[in-house]
Amino acid sequence: TQLLEQSPQFLSIQEGENLTVYCNSSSVFSSLQWYRQEPGEGPVLLVTVVTGGEVKKLKRLTFQFGDARKDSSLHITAAQPGDTGLYLCAGPTSGTYKYIFGTGTRLKVLA
Amino acid sequence: EAEVAQSPRYKITEKSQAVAFWCDPISGHATLYWYRQILGQGPELLVQFQDESVVDDSQLPKDRFSAERLKGVDSTLKIQPAELGDSAMYLCASSLGQDLTNEQYFGPGTRLTVT
């Protein structure tokens, strides 16, 4: 069974600090997606990474796909209160069209 | 910008009652997904449609849950009878197709509380 484990589960930081969230698996994924979800809302897609070693930037967010395509990271520079939310990674399971989601990282940025 | 629509946004029901949720995907999206999300956890796939056909419903509790997408456009998820453990956020998502790089777009969800 393919699993996506995220760490840390919870993170509370001060505005202006940097942070990294990890998404790990023992299985290879053809692609991984990162979402941010605010309370009471659906997840919003941030980025899709497809190629091993790929790095994508979205303003202050940097996403990296591991060379072996088994892991990914999300780095936020100078976090702001608006970054607060649940960060989820997701990917398609091999041999099926079914997506699985990671366990999630709940981030709180304090002003 | 096109969005996935869901209704209702909130639903409170008593256990043993029937409840239904509706989803209208982004126009042109052939693949539709229903997920259940327990508070603080990642979404879990309940059922996936490709057009009007079910592709995966392995995690759908079929004794009480049913889903349909009769014309391959909008979809309904039903629970009958509802149980206390069904309290969760029910999310609908859609994508252009089943290609593994196709991006999923989520609706705002329906928050179900069973009392």
Image (cartoon, rainbow, N blue to C red):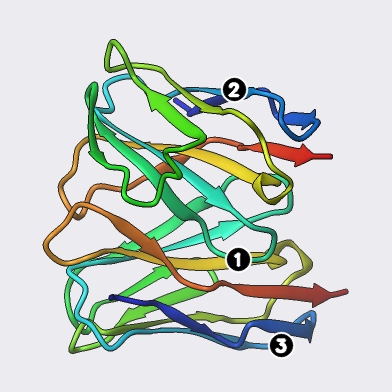
Q: Classify A108 as above or below A71.
A: above
Residue denoted by label 1: B41
Identified by mark 2, the residue type is Ala
| Tag 3 and tag 1, C-beta contact below 8 Å | no
CA–CA distance between discs 1 and 2? 23 Å
Of tags 2 and 3, the one toward the viewer is 2
Residue at disc 2, secondary structure:
strand
Location of the N terminus of chain A (image quadrant): bottom left
Where's residue A58, x and y in %?
Answer: 46, 65
Chain designation of label 1: B
Looking at the image, which residue sits at the far left?
Answer: A95
Q: Which mark is residue A17?
A: 3
Residue A86 rendering spot, x and y as whole percentages = 63, 65
Whether residue B52 appears in this view of the structure is: yes
Residue nearest the viewer, comparing B13 with B101? B13
Residue type at numbered disc 3: Glu
Report helix, strand or loop for mark 1: loop
Within 10 Å of disc 1 (Cα), the crowding (few <14, some 14-19, many 20+) is: some
Tell me if residue B79 comes above or below residue B59 in the rendering: above
Determine if marks 2 and 3 fall on one subunit.
no
The answer to which image quadrant residue B54 occupies is: top left
Of all residues shown, which one is farthest toward the right? A111
Q: Earlier in the sequence, mark 1 or mark 2?
A: 2
Q: Quadrant of the C terminus of chain A?
A: bottom right
Q: Nearer the viewer, mark 1 or mark 2?
A: 2
On the image, the x and y values in percent for residue A94 come to 16, 67
Residue type, numbered disc 1: Gln
